[in-house]
Amino acid sequence: MAVEIMDKIVSLCKRRGFIFQSSEIYGGINACYDYGPLGVELKRNVKEQWWRAMVVENEDIVGLDAAILMHPRVWEASGHVAGFTDPLVDCRQCKQRFRQDEIDPKKWEKRQCPACGNANVLTDARQFNLMFKTHMGPVEEDATVVYLRPETAQGIYVNYKNVMDSSRKKIPFGIAQIGKAFRNEITPGNFIFRTREFEQMEMQYFVKPGTDEEVWREWKDRRMAWYKRIGIHPEKLRFRQHGPDELAHYAKAAMDVEYEYPIGWKELEGIHNRTDFDLSRHQQFSGKDLSYFDDATRERFIPYIIETSAGCDRTVLTCLIDAYEEQKLENDTRTVLHFDPKLAPVKAAVFPLVNRDGMPELARKIMDDLRGEFIAFYDDSGAVGRRYRRQDEAGTPFCVTVDSQTLQDETVTVRDRDSMNQDRVAIRGLVPELRKRIWGK
Ligand code: GAP
């Protein structure tokens, strides 16, 4: 059942132009995906909501867009060269490769391989580094190795002084960034849940040591509230704190926001107390002073960092799953994506009821007005009921129809995707009315 829903979402995503397999005409490339016309809008809206909640609404947080390629020493300092590894085991019989921690421990004890099902000997675990390596310039030798960043965070840490000095911020303050990250995952999968190229939305908050635990608690609550604010069902969200044995090499405490996916409860975002680990290491490896001097208390210290690290693609997947519904109606089933209107790729569709009596011309004029505000879609083909269904499946919250009454009193019907109710609205007031229904103002 669960897997069935996932398959239906994957197929809807392709059919409606949300997400395609990358390089499909060449047979695809494993675990890489492209965002189509609807998907790119959904993703942009997710990012826009995150940026708004982080940068626009908070005077103490500023933005950054750092390069993907960084000095290789960054990844030595961060601990990724030595420690960003997964233990990998091979099955000698079926030749499949697994992350050791993903194999059922009971089967592991019996040394039974989960793929071929035969009791068999697995190889001992080897550490496999997840960073993608490439070379800078024309010579491929050790000295020219660079990495595709496996997290966006380090771009923020190495710029923290630049940002602080140029924007005259004082601690506590935060730096937010959205950007691509790359990991050579051993077991990618579940559509865009775990891929090798993905986007992160990360915010690093610099605080005085001693205040870190309280700030960490605040941020985990703020991040949970954000998912509710973008319309995710609260009962599908929960916290899960990491035990001491599963903490990343940089973290003193970590809390995941988890979502109940069709494949079970899984991590959506991590909120980490990274202590002074990163800045101390960068100070040590770069030889640059990264301490902070507090004018008021005359104290000097290396700031602690509270990180909120969300996967953008994983949030998109969460929005799709959370919004998906197959509604049984009297005579048929309607597939609806109940996106929060703020996230919906297309905000409104415009239909002339019939293609005559001046209705198309009027509908086109309304379309022009709406296009000045947001993405609207014009559709004049087929029965109006079918046109509604097509928009339901794309998650369009409002459908505006020009009918014969429009020609008499200059009103249109506005049909709500979720309730399927229709109201008559004056054309004059249509833009402000939709604006209110989408953004609440
Ligand atoms: N800077 C900290 C950090 O990167 P993480 O827990 O490794 O922490 C944070 O990653 C988030 O990034 C995850 O919660 C997830 O949403 C997303 N993420 C990580 N690996 C991913 C992958 N292979 N594919 C898609 N999203 C991923």
Image: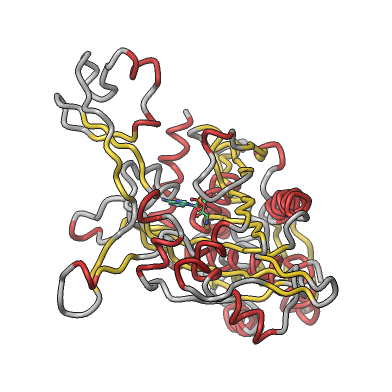
Say if 35 sits above or below 242 in the image. below
Horizontal relation, residue 240 to residue 215: left or right = left
Image spot of residue 278 (x, y percent): 54, 60
Could you tell me which residue is drawn at 48 percent across and 34 percent down? Answer: 263
Residue 164 point in image, percent of width and height: 66, 79
Q: Position of residue 58 (x, y in %)?
A: 76, 71
In the rendered image, the vertical position of residue 141 relative to residue 190, given as above or below: below
Colouring method of the image:
secondary structure
Q: Is residue 24 above or below residue 299?
A: above
**In the orientation shown, which residue stands out farthest toward the right?**
296
Q: Quadrant of the C terminus?
A: bottom right
Q: Percent position (x, y) of residue 217? A: 75, 48
Q: Which of the 4 image quarters holds residue 67?
A: bottom left
Front-lying residue, 143 or 178: 143
Q: Is residue 326 above or below residue 306?
A: above
Task: Tell me: 54 left or right of 189.
Answer: right
Q: Nearer the viewer, residue 55 or 264?
A: 55
Given residues 181 and 403, the one toward you in this image is: 181
Write the residue at 36% across / 26% down.
Answer: 103
Q: How many marks?
A: 0
Does residue 25 show up? yes
Quadrant of res 243:
top right
The answer to whether one can see residue 336 in this image is no
Identify which residue, 404 or 190, lies in the foreground. Answer: 190
Residue shown at 57%/76% (left/top)?
64
Q: Where, by quadrant of the figure, is residue 167 drawn? A: bottom right
